[in-house]
């Protein structure tokens, strides 16, 4: 890491948790980063086969809002750290979806993921090394019933690591910000 950790300071997420303005700005940036994927997931995934979803690492709640607006039969849960709750609830309330999209605080390493037909890990796996990625995927799989689904999306890069400039730069950013994070290939 080439950030505050280099001098023994707090990691990016811990330092943001202490500054509401920085946290709010980061949550808004994550919404902007996720809206394209959210629209594609809403349009292409067979949501008619499912009733519930849990968005783990939901940030401001951009993906749950897009899904709930596109599919009125769905009920969702946004899962993130406790400090994110007021930001999430405000965003969901502004979109008038507080009756179908709820909040759940969780520590992704200690708490189980909430049971849902579909568990979504958006821009979550890239923050961790391979072993931790596998742990998160196992927790997501454990939360879905038979016939359920796990959706993971990031700026996935090609196996040759030559084509997705955005994904490659995002991977470099993750390496700068933490000890083990990086984008990954489909393989």
Image: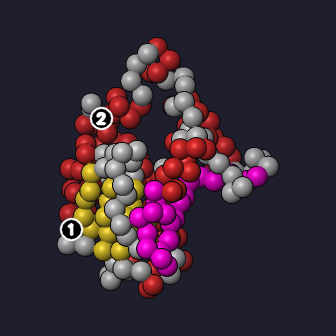
**Is residue 95 found left or right of 52 in the rendered image?**
left
Residue 147 colored magenta? Answer: yes
**Quadrant (top left, top right, bottom left, bottom right) of the C terminus:** bottom right
**Is residue 86 found left or right of 47 in the rendered image?**
left
Secondary element at tag 2:
helix
Residue 82 colored magenta? Answer: no
Coloring applied to the structure:
secondary structure
Residue 149 seen in the current view: yes
- Tell me the number on the disc at residue 17: 2
Give the mark, 1 or 2, whose residue is nearer the N terminus: 2
Residue 159 percent location from the top left of the image: 76, 52
From the viewer's perspective, is residue 132 above or below residue 10?
below
The magenta segment is 139-159
Say which residue appears at 40% left-offset and 44% top-offset. Answer: 109
Say which residue appears at 49% left-offset and 52% top-offset. Answer: 136
Q: Nearer the viewer, residue 104 or 64?
A: 104
- Tell me the number on the disc at residue 5: none
- Tell me the number on the disc at residue 98: 1
Q: Nearer the viewer, residue 85 or 105?
A: 105
Secondary element at tag 1:
loop
Residue farthest to the top, as pictured: 7
Give the alpha-carbon distance from disc 1 to disc 2, as whole Å.
24 Å
**Is residue 44 found left or right of 10 in the rendered image?**
right
Residue 20 percent location from the top left of the image: 25, 37
Residue 68 seen in the current view: no
Residue 66 percent location from the top left of the image: 38, 69
**Labels in figure, total:** 2
Say which residue appears at 59% left-offset and 52% top-offset. Answer: 155
């Amino acid at each position: 890491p080439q950030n505050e950790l280099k001098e023994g300071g707090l990691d990016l997420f811990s330092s943001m948790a202490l500054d509401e303005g920085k946290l709010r700005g980061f949550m808004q940036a994550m919404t902007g980063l996720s809206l394209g994927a959210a629209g594609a997931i809403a349009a292409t995934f067979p949501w008619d086969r499912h009733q519930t979803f849990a968005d783990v690492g939901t940030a401001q709640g951009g993906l749950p809002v897009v899904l709930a607006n596109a599919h009125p039969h769905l009920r969702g849960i946004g899962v993130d750290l406790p400090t994110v709750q007021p930001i999430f609830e405000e965003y969901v309330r502004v979109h008038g979806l507080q009756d179908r999209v709820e909040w759940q605080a969780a520590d992704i390493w200690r708490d189980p993921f909430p049971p849902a037909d579909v568990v979504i890990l958006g821009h979550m796996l890239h923050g961790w090394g391979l072993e931790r990625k596998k742990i998160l995927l196992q927790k997501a799989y454990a939360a879905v019933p038979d016939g359920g689904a796990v959706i993971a999306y990031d700026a996935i890069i090609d196996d040759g690591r030559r084509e997705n400039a955005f994904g490659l730069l995002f991977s470099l950013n993750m390496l700068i910000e933490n000890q083990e994070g990086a984008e990954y290939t489909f393989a």
